Image: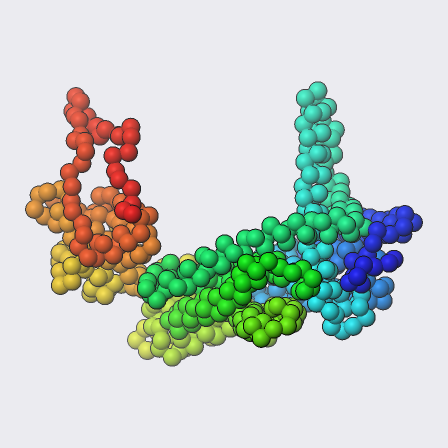
Amino acid sequence: MTSTGTGVTPDEPPAADHNALGGARLIVGFVQGVALYLIYLAVDHHVWPSTNAYWMAPLLMVFVFVPLLFIQAVGTMRPLTLGLWAIAAAAILALLGWFDIWRQWDSTGATAPSGNGDMTFTLVAFTIVGLFIAQSLITAADAERKYVARYSAYFEVAWKLEIQLLLSAVFVGVFWGVLWLGAFLFNLINLHFIEDLIEKPWFAIPASTLAVAAALHATDVRSRLIAGVRTVAHTLLSWLLPLMVLIAVGFTLSLPFTGLQPLWATKSAAGLLLTAAGVLVILINAAFQDGDPEHNRAPVMRWSEFAAALVLVPFVLIAAYALWLRVDQYGWTTDRVLTAATTLVALAYALGYAAAALLSLGGGVWMALLARVNVAAAFLVLGILLGLFTPIADPARLSVSSQVARLRSGAVSPSHFDFNYLQAEGGRYGRQALAELATADFGKDTAKVRDLIKQALTGTYVSPPSPAKADLAKTITVYPRGSALPASFMTQDWSHSEDVVVSCLTQATAKCDAFLADIFGDRGDEVILTDGDVAYLSATVYARRPDGKWRSIGTFNSSCPGMVEALRAGKMQVVAPEFRDVAINGVRLRPSASYSLYSGCNP
């Protein structure tokens, strides 16, 4: 095979090589299909290996992923390199699958857990990411006979693989669409053999793996097709960069005026900011491409890259600060550990891209440092993934240690500790921690806490405690300041109410705002409770019944900005309804408007 200028992307091979590669790929695809069908039979008949998850999970990991790695790389990677990589990948995947089962079980190992080898979604999702990166790095390095290849080689290989996977997924979807269309057509004339055939697992599983193999082969030997799709994708994505830069810069410049409180009110600031940072990284690379100066990018694109690289830094730093606030207040959880890992990668990109932008001002190839940053970040991601899915930095282990440390240090009281989390999310580590805590001394609360731990260990949900009545004064902020809620409202037991109950009435950690208003015009105040979210108003109205009990009588919502702030400032009036109710033969009816009687948000 000859190669193009990068030494990576092959030209279309001669027919003989084409046929040989195609045959090899189809054989591997068929063997993969047969192996997966045999695993399916084992599950269906409840025989080994489905009866032992320690075998089932590794087998699934190996037979799902390793054949795909081989099919994609054969003919591109040297046989020795491909063989060593396939063996190494199989060993790593088997160990990751085994450990994922081990960490979910608290068995001593004498009896292996039964089941179908159900692995966590997180493992499967991040395995795909890790294998994509590793396959790209190894393929490019092998093509250039170097441990670390040129950036242009990584660029070619990664984009080729990405487009191959995308087109293969589309092909398999169309393949099954055509089969089902044929089945429906024959069903019209009462011939059901096609439908019966494609519903058989012995056909469906090998047919799917063969379709994937065929698609990967077709996209591999059509290098010009891949290059064309890549060019179109880069062109479209790159012209989204100036738009995203305007949004990101405008958002950043607005923060000094709005403050960070609106971000914290969303309760997902870190995730949103990291998502935006990820989009910026993708669009920057779509414009940068392989960094070849001959691309001669337009000035608007070059300065968009510059601005995007700089604005990444505040985005990631604010996301890190948001995460730190949550961890400082509530400790580590598995989700927060994964977010921290993502933040670390994002920080590497942000600092590297900012350095590339600033160095570009001194001359030379524009944003040239991006190439080194991208390669270093790829290796960093692989290292982090291996840490997360091995005992080194297992999120479950770290989060359980954090939560137990908070309990032992007194940062959270035993009566408010989330024992459900240790049982449901902590896996082996959580259940072992519960077993150890079951013998701990909690003073006067020891008997009660041990009972809660016993419930958690048996899988029984431990209900969070309701705040004491006096705690309502802490969970509810009354407006206008200095006002007080009726004593009967504060002393009512909301824990068993069948009405709509705002979280601050039953959860000690929840907060909400309260407003008094005479909704009925009877000179008696009703209570309006909101959750204090400044981005979206959601309020529940409570009224006192003749028997002295309070109950919810309705809700109102608004997506207009600044509504909660306006409520806090006292900008609320009670207005009469447009229509009054109609009573017909003693039945009370309320008219519904056939057109909108209400104004939209203020400009």
Q: How many marks?
A: 0
**Where is 23 relative to 119, above or below?**
above
Q: In the displayed structure, does residue 548 sit left or right of residue 275?
A: left
- Identify whether 46 is placed above or below 434: above
> Looking at the picture, how far across and down is residue 37, in whole percent?
74, 48
Q: Quadrant of the N terminus?
A: bottom right
- Which quarter of the picture shows residue 358? bottom right
Q: Give the residue at x 39% y 64%.
A: 253
Q: Residue 8: where, in percent of width, then height?
A: 78, 61
From the viewer's side, name the closer residue of 125 and 285: 285
The picture quadrant where one finds residue 179 is: top right
Vertically, is 236 above or below 134?
Answer: above
Viewer-closest of 223 and 520: 223
Residue 49 rendering spot, x and y as whole percentages: 71, 56
Answer whether residue 586 is visible to the viewer in this image.
yes
- Residue at (18% x, 36% y) in the render: 577
Q: Residue at x 85, y 67 (%)?
A: 80
Task: Between residue 356 and residue 105, name the one nearer to us.
Answer: 356
Provide residue 173's location: percent of width, then percent of height. 67, 41
Residue depicted at 44% across the width and 62% down the height: 249
